[in-house]
Image: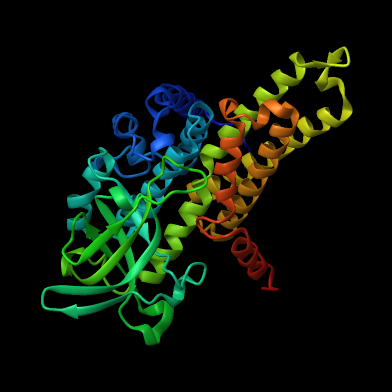
Amino acid sequence: MHFELSADHQARKAFGIELGTTLNDSLAAAPHDRTWPHAAWTAAAKAGLTGLLIPESYGGQGGDALGAAATLEGLGYGCTDGGFCFALGAHLWGCAMPIALFGTEEQKAALLPGLCDGRMVGALAITEPEAGSDAFHLRTGAQPTAGGYLLRGHKTFITNGPIAGVTLVLASEEPARGAHGLAGFLLEHEAPGSTRRGPVAKMGLTTAQMGELLLKECFVPATRRLGDGRLGMAIFSHAMEWERGLILAPVVGAMQRQLERCIAYAQQRKQFGRPIGQFQLVATKLVDMHLRWEQARWALYRFAWLKQQGRSAFREAAIAKLTISEAWIASCQDAMQIHGGYGYLSETGLERELRDALAGRIYSGTSEMQRQVIAQWLGVG
């Protein structure tokens, strides 16, 4: 394994950079009022980003894991809106990919084209008020009834929830069986018995719409039970593997952009008669930022390479999620320190990057949970 991207993958990264740059204008106003940036989403969909890795027969781009990683890394370099990149990842890895992997032919034919062309936004509803990291003790239940199921429960922290056309809901058919009693249900917009709340105000990632879902005798047809058989545990595991492994791919690009910006600033900003980059303490911060970016990139492409081989990468997904999220926070703090008082000003965008970065320790499983996953692989968890 090596990290020299093929010419095709380099072209995909360049494409992501170009597209991300063009999206910035339409995204500029959205973070301040928490409105969903339809224009940017439509442009991303037209360019194929909403269907990465989905087979072409269903309207997707096909492609491979390395190509997806390269495209999204480029997107994060070009696009300065972390919330939009995060929302795109939630759509892809939390909803579209599970349908592509586990859906029946009818489900894939009915739902994937709309998810790929941007007509529908996808969401994944797992977390509940009393079950966040402990996802296998969900209280949302699914009771069989004539022609389908009745869902009862309360889901929270649903990225894309308020605007989702399709929400994959994880619920328990047999609570006594724990994780083995879970199943996935494809809830379409305005389903009877469902109530959406949000978007909620957040510290960062403000473009990404986040909300709640109340399910009170919500009827879901049997044809919208994801896949054949009780696959909830497999659906959860695969969704988390892809999400943890690739949802921070744009951050790797953003880290490169931030590092280049800080180097340029350290070269031109003068104090005591010389560029601040010549001071060892500033230079050390830049070196640390470079090392973190290299480590983050390694973790990302290690995961993508394994998936390219068709191999399981649950541990590597946890390593990627933990490595990139923690590195991004540390580098954002260093970037602000290098810029001094200017870094604290909203107009520079550095404080916004830090606010966005802090969420990376929480979503898709906290940093503590990633350490627990890795510890179990080491035989000590």
Quadrant in the picture for residue 377: bottom right
- Residue 312 point in image, percent of width and height: 51, 59
Give 198 or 187, whichever is nearer the viewer.
198
Find the residue positioned furthest to the left. 146
| Image coords of residue 225 (percent x, y) | 23, 67
Which image quarter is the C terminus in? bottom right
Near-viewer residue (216 or 318): 216
Q: Is residue 345 left or right of residue 42?
A: right
Q: Is residue 149 above or below residue 238?
A: below
Could you tell whether 380 is left or right of 324 in the image? right
Q: Is residue 10 visible?
A: yes
Question: Residue placed at 51% from the left, 44% from the top?
Answer: 204
Tell me: residue 210, above or below residue 341. Answer: below
Q: In this view of the protein, can residue 310 be seen by the observer?
A: no
Q: Nearer the viewer, residue 283 or 103?
A: 283
Q: Quadrant of the N terminus?
A: top right
Which residue is pictured at 33% across the width and 37% down the height? 61
Q: What x and y, as percent, mark residue 349?
A: 57, 29
Point out residue 136 in the picture as x, y percentages from the top left corner: 45, 74
Q: Quadrant of residue 169?
A: bottom left
What is the total number of numbered labels drawn onto the structure image? 0
Identify the residue at horizontal 33%, vertical 40% (top origin): 51
Q: How is the image coloured?
A: rainbow
Work out whether 88 lies above or below 109. Answer: above
